[in-house]
Image (cartoon, grey):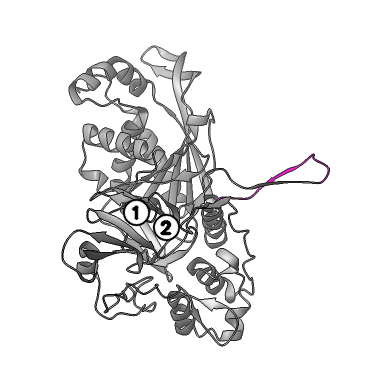
Amino acid sequence: MAKVELLMPKMGESIMEATILKWVKNVGDKVEEDETILEIATDKVDSEIPSPVDGVIVEILHQVDEVIPIGQVVAIIQTAGEESPSDPNPVVAEQAPKEQKPQVDQQPETPIKIVTPATPSVVPATPVAHKTGSDRFYSPLVKSIAKNEGIVLNELDAIPGTGKDGRLTKSDILSYIENRSTGITPMPIAASSSTHTTSNNGTSATMSSPARSFSTSGEDEIIEMDRMRRLIADHMVMSKRVSPHVTSFVEADVTNLVNWRSANKGAFMEKYGEKITFTPLIMEAVIKAIKDFPMINVTTSDNKIHVKKNINLGMAAALPTGNLIVPVIKNAAYLNLAGLTKTVNDLAHRARQNKLKPDEVQGGTFTVTNVGTFGNVMGTPIINQPQVAILALGAIRKKPAVMETEYGDVIAVRQMMFLSHSYDHRVVDGLLGGSFVRRVADYLEAFDAKRAI
């Protein structure tokens, strides 16, 4: 018999740790190669971890809700074959650096050392956090960030943590560093309190519904935020704190676009096998406008403006849970209408199924959100940092509008929609922000009603 170590895989360039959400398999269960063993969550997206081999799970080293660095052993799988020392997951092991420590001053996150037992016997994995001079535990990444930022132990102990049992997470310390100069200390956020049950092998199973508590009077219900909602809350508060938001509004006549879609959606489906919505049609106009105003397609960091050559469009998608996720259409400028439609439909579908990969929710340079889906005519969206602008699409409604004709002005029923453009006033002034959204509207209004599919 041979034993293979299942390692926590690297889920993205900037992801250094993941939380175990659920063990799909238990000790003693048989698994086939590529069969899901556990579900994990990162600060970007949830994922399923498959088995690298056929075999039987003989040991589970970490339980539900534990935060595990990438490269750390989470389970042992026994396979048929000659006895040999525990082998690491070959896919992960090939990617693992020999000896590296986090270097925060070079880039936000870097790979950490992967520890693999050298003896045939299976040794329980070392804890994620390492003991300091105080009674509090800190992960290697948190300790490295603190060292590079000159945060002493007493100061570190005073920072509130949002992790399990008050554990200090990477987000906590980065938020603290960001606010240290202003004297504002981030308040702790209540940790998720999903109900757990313990199986015979000692692992935990997570109940899907959030924990609820009620007031003594029975009139109020208190529901704790789930993990994703807490991440969204932190990101939105940070964005408003960092960027002075300004929003410009434009109303666009999209009658030609609406009529073209109504007349061609059946033929489009027949030709490309995809249902065409308004989103890819509007994305086309956004891409053209970004090409006209490239300073909208930028990000900021350390008082520097990074002008992006590629247009990576984020599309905000509402999940069945009520939460929000922003998958990214990479290199959108290189896609034609059929390609945009296929990509939009695929990302939206997999977002609702919780099947997005970590890299598919990163790297956006401009975001579009559709508030019209909920019947709203306009909105004031919050910028998705470190981007500098976001466009909200209002509901398309029939309205009376004044039209100029060769016989004079007339009032006609037209398909109208509002575009709301929020932008970071540190980088984008009113001329650029207002001109951009006006240009998007111009492209929409100039849509060719006789366009071929």
Tell me the residue at 60%/50% (across/down).
Answer: 225
Helix, strand or loop for the magenta stretch, by majority: loop
Image height of 124 relative to 429, above or below: below
**Residue 76: percent from the left, percent from the top?**
32, 63
Range of magenta residues: 216-226
Marker disc for residue 358:
1
223 magenta-colored? yes
**Residue 265: percent from the left, percent from the top?**
28, 19
Question: Residue 285 lies in what quarter of the image?
Answer: top left
Disc tally is 2
**Residue 271: percent from the left, percent from the top?**
18, 22
Image height of 150 relative to 354, above or below: below
**Is there CB contact under 8 Å for labels 2 and 1?**
yes
Determine if residue 242 is in view: yes
Q: Amino acid at mark 2?
A: Thr
Marker disc for residue 42:
2
